[in-house]
Amino acid sequence: MEQNNAYALIGLGHLHYDFKEFKDALYYWSKMYEVNKDNVDIRILTSIGNCHRKLRSFDKGVYYFERALEMDPKNFYALFGLADCYRGMNQQYRSIEYWNRILEIDPANKVILTRMGDAYRNTGDYEKANDFYNKALDIDFDTYAALGLALICKGEGKYKEAAEKLSSLIKNDLKNYRLYIDLADCYVKLNDKAQAINVLESFQKLGLRSTAINELLEKLRNNRPIYS
């Protein structure tokens, strides 16, 4: 009835996004953007940016989030989107800039504190990473902050301590396949391949499926190199 009806375009964008059909959501929101390019709603900009985040076309997402920030320098979704895009592009120092801008507004945001910890850990700055993870845990328990501390131990070559932390996390999060992979890797580093295999098999015994678990288990069972 009306090809460029704003409410229909926005609604279709939201529906497809909710069903994780990000390309289709991007199509409808981009049409909305083209119709109102000179007077675009900030929510359309962040929605398009989020589609690019989900599609991993991070460099394209940056443009829309930056436009949103020009309209509102403290917009949470724009700041978060830019930080996450730079994280996805492995530009950790740029991501830190935007995570920090969120913390200036909301210093007790546990999720952002953990993301800051991740960013510093990925740059090799374990001291700062440790501080941010602990700040997050001081607010409330967070699996990813606790995992970050375990990965710091692993990065420092403290494989036994890392294994203990990861084993504790698994007890509270049995279905998180990543924990099993990191724990198995600790045992590989400790030259205990049998225990690494046991860890991966314990995940499979839960009736869960993970391609990453299966591939690592197959390599260990067949004495194939696990690092490439």
Image: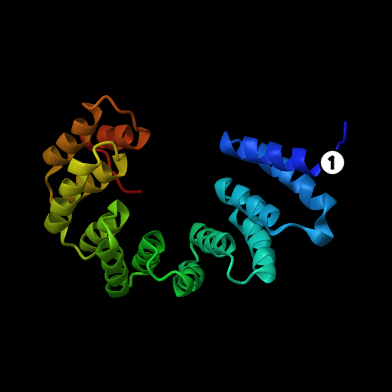
Disc 1 designates what residue?
4
**Left or right: 130 with respect to 79?**
left
Residue drawn 29% across the image and 58% down it: 145
Residue drawn 27% across the image and 69% down it: 130
What is the x, y in percent for residue 105?
48, 72
**Left or right: 51 with respect to 153?**
right
Dot 1 crowding, Cα within 10 Å, few <14, some 14–19, many 20+: few
- Secondary structure at badge 1 equals loop
Residue drawn 37% across the image and 69% down it: 120
Number of dots carrying numbers: 1
Residue extending farthest to the front is: 7
**Left or right: 91 with respect to 9?**
left
What is the x, y in percent for residue 23?
66, 39
The three-letter code of the residue at mark 1 reads Asn
Above or below for 55 versus 134: above
What is the x, y in percent for residue 215?
32, 34
- In this view, the residue in front, 182 or 110, is 110
Assign the N terminus to one quadrant of the image.
top right
Res 76 quadrant in image: bottom right
